[in-house]
Image: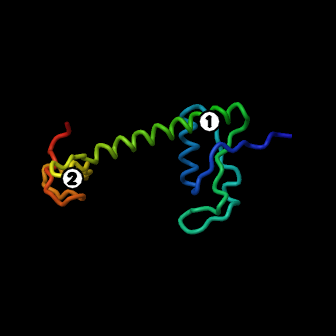
Amino acid sequence: MPNEPICVRRTTTVEAADIIVAWLAEHDIAATIPDRDSFGTFAFGVTDTEGVQVCVADEATAVRARVLLDEHERELKAEAAKLDEERLVEVTCEECGFRCTFAAELRGSVQECPECGAFVDVPRCVG
């Protein structure tokens, strides 16, 4: 009797599960979406509350897959945080000392301090 597949990740859509399966394959891990056609879907491929399972064949592979997926998730979050930082400009108001944060699109403009209303120059360059 073959072992039951071991779930390493749950997603809300089949499309997201397919991406994970492909990513794991790039890292030499065979993964599947068991019962792909048997779960209930609502509009736009979103599944019920249990989600779509991405599974592997054995526990050793499951451990490796989970480690890789967790590592990848941390890297993606770090990249997103870095992008967010690059999109923001922090300026200290000369009138009240409040640290204002503005969108990068406002570089080179004059804005109002949200604390005291004084004009604040948003520099063109970082640094």
Task: Answer above or below: position of 117 versus 17.
Answer: below
Counting from the top left corner in percent of width and height, residue 101 is at: 27, 51
Which residue corresponds to mark 1?
65
Point out the residue furthest to the front here. Answer: 96
Counting from the top left corner in percent of width and height, residue 115 is at: 24, 58
Q: Secondary structure at mark 1?
A: helix
Counting from the top left corner in percent of width and height, residue 45 is at: 56, 62
Residue depicted at x 64% and y 46%: 54
Q: Secondary structure at mark 2?
A: helix
Q: Which mark is residue 105?
A: 2
Residue depicted at x 65% and y 61%: 49
Answer with mark 1 or mark 2, whichever residue precedes in sequence.
Answer: 1
* Image position of 61 (left or right of 43): right
Point out the residue furthest to the right here. Answer: 1
Counting from the top left corner in percent of width and height, residue 74 is at: 49, 38
**Distance CA(mark 1)–CA(mark 2):** 40 Å
Disc 1 residue type (three-letter): Ala
